[in-house]
Amino acid sequence: MSAQRLPEEAWVVALSSLPGLGPARLRSLLALGEPEMVWRSVLSGTLPNELSAGVSARIKPGLCGQWRTAARSIDPGAYWQAHVDAGIGVMTQWSASFPDVLAQDDDAPVVLFWLGDIDRLAGTRVAIVGTRRATRYGIDVANEFARELSLAGVAVVSGLALGIDGAAHAGALAVDGAPPIAVVGSGLDHIYPRAHRALWRAVAERGVVMSEYPLGASAVAWQFPARNRIIAALADVVVVVESQSTGGALGTAVEAARRGRTVLAVPGPITAPSSAGTNQLLFDGCGPVRDVGDVLLALGLQPERRRTATEQRPSPIGNAKKVLEALPWQAIPVEQIIDSTGLDLGVVMLALLQLETDGWVAQRSGWIERIARGGAQ
Amino acid sequence: MLATIASATLSGIDGVPVTVEVHVSNGLPAFTVVGLPDASCREARDRVRAALLSSEFTWPDRRTTVNLAPTSLRKIGSSLDLAIAIGVLVASEQLSAEVVAGRAFLAEMGLDGSLRHVPGALSLAAACTPPEVIVSPASYSEAVLVSGIEVRCATNLRELVDALKAEAPWPRPPDETFIAPPSDGPDLSDVRGHPMARFAIEVAAAGGHHLLMVGPPGSGKTMLADRLPSLLPDLDDATAFDATRVHSAAGARIIGGLVRRPPLRAPHHGMSAVAMVGGGTHRIRPGEISMAHGGVLFLDEMGEFGAVVLDSLRQPLEEGVIRIARAEARVELPARFLLVGAMNPCPCGEGVVPSACRCTDRSLERYRRRLSGPLLDRFDLRIDVHRADPRQLIGGEPAEASSVVAARVRLARASAQSRGVKCNAELSSSALETTSPLSTDAAKLIERCLESGRLSARGMRRVWRVARTIADLERYEGALTAEHVASALHLRSDPAFLARSVAS
């Protein structure tokens, strides 16, 4: 392919693949001139020392050299073709069809890659975020909110991570509603976490998976907070379901608050480490969420009066009933159930297996978690 | 003149009969030892010479050749000292050949002519062909454990020669100083709370099931493991004999009869693979797994052991013996032990409680890889140990004592023996099916677990055996019920740290 025929995006894509190049540096590089010209000066090592003012992007000594070395091994034409072949959409900040909500952002991604249909971004969006180390409670809540919001026509934005993110996407996919939207922190060919391969594909098919990193970019730690800012920017309301006292979800909340978005938090037990972050958000003045109606209210939508879901699980009998009654709403080890019911291990285990089959409880590494009505299986 | 004396040397833990031939002839004064002696064996020459002179015998200033037959076997250690000394005496005609016929000699010599203990005296005495064996007083208590031989002892060479010549009566063997059999150490009644873990070690003891305990620091894993031997019955004769031979060969003093109580070995995680399975360049020494033969091998902080060390356990776990091959020797050591592992659920230690763990995914991933799947699979029992309920720690009722639990374990083992095995863990698949049928409910339950992928075919057999043991502990004879299987399933749950990452 002759170099002259390449669209402007191709050069931006090539530039975005250079090492140590975040959105800020990319933006200041592109401020120097046409992308093709910038690429050629990176190749020839004739970049000016000072990039645009106001950006802390004074290039570290050596970085130019690294870029030059990296650039030599990249053929922009072939790289561009790889994106086209993989069916990945590419759009720069200056493109006319760049999503409004991101275009207006002061820290917008310079270039956006996506799988699926970018038009599905239209409409109201709510981000459901939270910890990867979620409890059953968090997973149930995330799943249910995503289902209800999706049904109400609100697109659910999340990050395809383990735990809450995954539960939110799974919930949105479980119903025939608004399309799910995922923003990921790696190149679209680097599925991370691997366990979410199927979920990733399903979201791309029904909604859109977006990233600001080109093909071949692996999941590097700093890219996840950066990804969170895009989630925050995309969302009209951010719901933090569960978060430890330090966690990426709190970063999303801060980014959202900075952009004037409403941040809501799901309360949890004050003793649960998995809810320490959300309870802190509540203390700091974020609104609490009691049910999905609270989220819809925050969006200015009239929550439809929904009848509470009817109980479809068969009511437990005998020992299963006794065990279920002894279960609190937090995960407990089997040992404690034996202690509180006075039943034998075998009897308790059989009862739990029955309850598990009927969808009343879930077992996770020896801990028993009670599933709320309509909770995720 | 030629003298031929019977003795023995050690190979692994087995004694091998050795014939010491001493030839004294005219020629330049010289003393050579041939027949693959190792360094400590060659040194015998200096010890024997000094011992003879101190005992007021004469050293033949002639050409002396000592041959150790069979010559193809490397002779290790000092157990041949006494035989060489006696051989020199006979060959130099200071002692008549008749008095040494039909006698074997096993002792190390001191420079003053005293007889000293040699490691593995039990195996050595058992290997000797003559009906009478002469050992040092310190080895006497071990050698008398061998049936069918007469054991004599003497404190020094002069005393021994006088007795051999029948000029003096045989010295009296040392008084068997009565030492109470080593107590089983701590008692299970010290453990408060932990109903599940107590049950698990009871099942482990009754069925011989390997046990992995996963729990946060300070939750009592070590305390529980330390008390496991107190639940085990005495070793049977064959096992006790093997265990005693191993301990004797490793240099431990055997006092008061065979090792009857199951040993507990708890090596540190810094150990090498050779220390675990046995080995060594010259003399092959038994490793921890053989020292634990018949008892418990407790690996605390199992995740910290080297991967090579842990994986070296796999074959002996299956076969009950370890075969060590070196260029010069090939030995087989008994190694049938109950493996008890303890580890933290993750590097930060808090991982048994959902979402309390502070570890990064990467460190968890590394930690998970420490235990290989095949090794993990060999644990019939895998339990989470939680921190005990504080109410039970302070002021709780004292729990059941070891003796009470041990009585139940004995009965359960008796049921296993009626099926022709020592414990249920050894039941073969076919024996399992014929002796322990599943009830309809239990079969359904197992089927369900197989279908859902919770159990593999091998895992199913292991759960089945554990269910058998649980039923044995209840003295239940009929087809195994669903309760038994459900309990066994719970006792073999996936360790928390392995299951955690599949959260969503």
Image: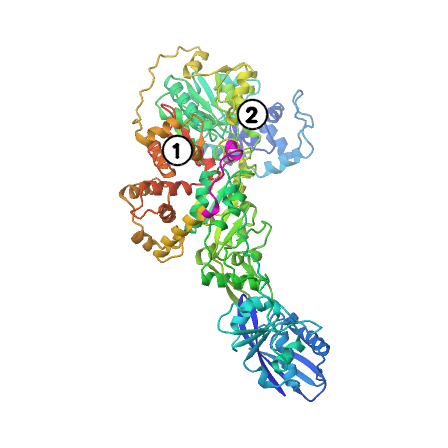
**Residue A292, position in %: x, y?**
41, 17
Determine whether, in the image, residue B492 is placed left or right of residue B21: left
Residue wearing tag 1: A342
Q: Nearer the viewer, mark 2 or mark 1?
A: 1
Name the residue furthest bottom.
Answer: B26
**Residue B449, position in %: x, y?**
34, 41
**Element at badge 2?**
loop
Name the residue furthest left.
Answer: B440
Quick check: marks 2 and 1 in contact, CB under 8 Å?
no
Q: Residues within 10 Å of mark 1 (few under 14, many from 20)?
A: few
Measure how far apart labels 2 and 1 are at the Cα level.
36 Å
Which disc, if any, is residue A310? Answer: none
Range shown magenta: B386-403
Image height of B303 relative to B357, above or below:
below
Which disc, if any, is residue A245? Answer: 2
Task: For residue A19, say whether it is visible.
Answer: yes
